Amino acid sequence: MDEQERDAPDPGLPTSPTGRTPQWVVDETLGLPVQPVPWRAPGPPAPRRHRAGLLGPLAVLLVVGGSLGAAVLTGAVPWPGESPAAVGAPVDPRPDRSVPTTAAAPTDRPTPGNGASRAPLGRPPRVPADPGAHAFAQLQSDAVTPVSYDPCRAVHYVIRPDGAPPGGEGLVHAAVERISAATGLRFAYDGPTDELSTAERNPFQPDRYGDRWAPVLVAWQTEAENPDLAGDIVGQAGSLAVSLGEGTRVYVTGTVSLDAGQFPEILDQRDGEATASGIVLHELAHLVGLAHVDDESQLLHPQTVPGITDFADGDLTGLVRLGQGACVPEL
């Protein structure tokens, strides 16, 4: 879309004092790269940053490449199924029986299987009759199967309420409920948190959250707190995938950042609540693993169309597939 097209206001939309249609940006996905440490399989590169104009009050979507954290996890204790060589320890065919064989628990990840059930906690709905366009943020090594959250565990989340607009928490809970219904994944709200959302967030914080992966962090942030929300950008989201060696990659935690300054302006628009709801749904779809598509009828299209504030068939098809991931209790 050229500048002339972007600057021309839609006569059916509210305009700013300058006469221009309000322009906001909502992130695509962080496309979080997997760090090449021994227990993670290498991931694809982060997507390139780009802008695209929008036709509706949501205005502009933006791709923001980034990472939840680059901490190299420590602890050389083998996980179930790993040989000592897999974590760099020498293999001794004649082990010393005079010393205890019980190894200390790893300090860089939760106890394996913590919070995992023996079967998926929910069931995805049926795939729509018309599958529609959809795409995934990351794929397994077969280049076909999407990386997803473990359906045998609840996806825990917390909300940092600082800076939230009136009704902001309700928007998040409603979007989580919608994502849960569309994927079959089960979510659990752990309450408010005072944790700061940072680019180098540690996925394992036992002192704060106990012996489990840190919950998904939803935070309302200002541009000063998160420079990625500068200008027209109103949100970003992504998840971190881990694996044991070359095994199945699984998302274990993530972040959703929403612009504390611009959401009140969005909510003050005509149909602003529906627009704001669509933004949060868009971000949560990225959180669980969807990427942008070129189909204008889908909520995950980088350019929103007036009236598209909920998932369409292509979005729903992708979300169903993301709810059919493997259970990986060893993580």
Image (cartoon, rainbow, N blue to C red):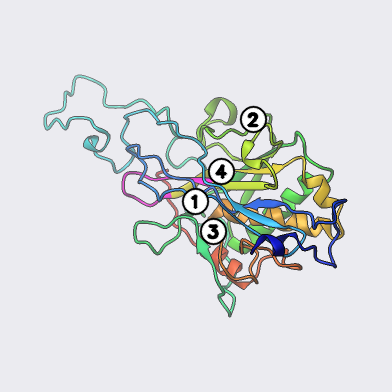
Residue that badge 1 annotates: 48
Please say if 2 is above or below 154: below
Look at the image and say whether residue 192 sits in the magenta stretch: no
Q: Are marks 3 and 2 in contact (CB under 8 Å)?
A: no
* Label 1 crowd (10 A; few <14 / some 14-19 / many >=20): few
Of the numbered discs 2 and 4, the one sitting upstream in the chain is: 2
Q: Please rate how many residues cluster around mark 3, counting C-alpha atoms within 10 Å: few if below 14, some from 14 to 19, many from 20.
A: many
Q: Which label number is shown at residue 219?
A: none
Q: Earlier in the sequence, mark 2 or mark 1?
A: 1
Residue at image coords 75%, 36%: 161
Task: Answer with left or right where residue 311 lies relative to residue 78.
Answer: right
Residue holding disc 3: 291
> Mark 1: which secondary structure?
loop
With respect to residue 130, does 238 lie above or below? Answer: above
Instruction: State yes or no: discs 2 and 4 in contact (Cβ < 8 Å).
Output: no
Q: Amino acid at mark 4?
A: Gly
Closer to the camera in the image, 138 or 112: 138
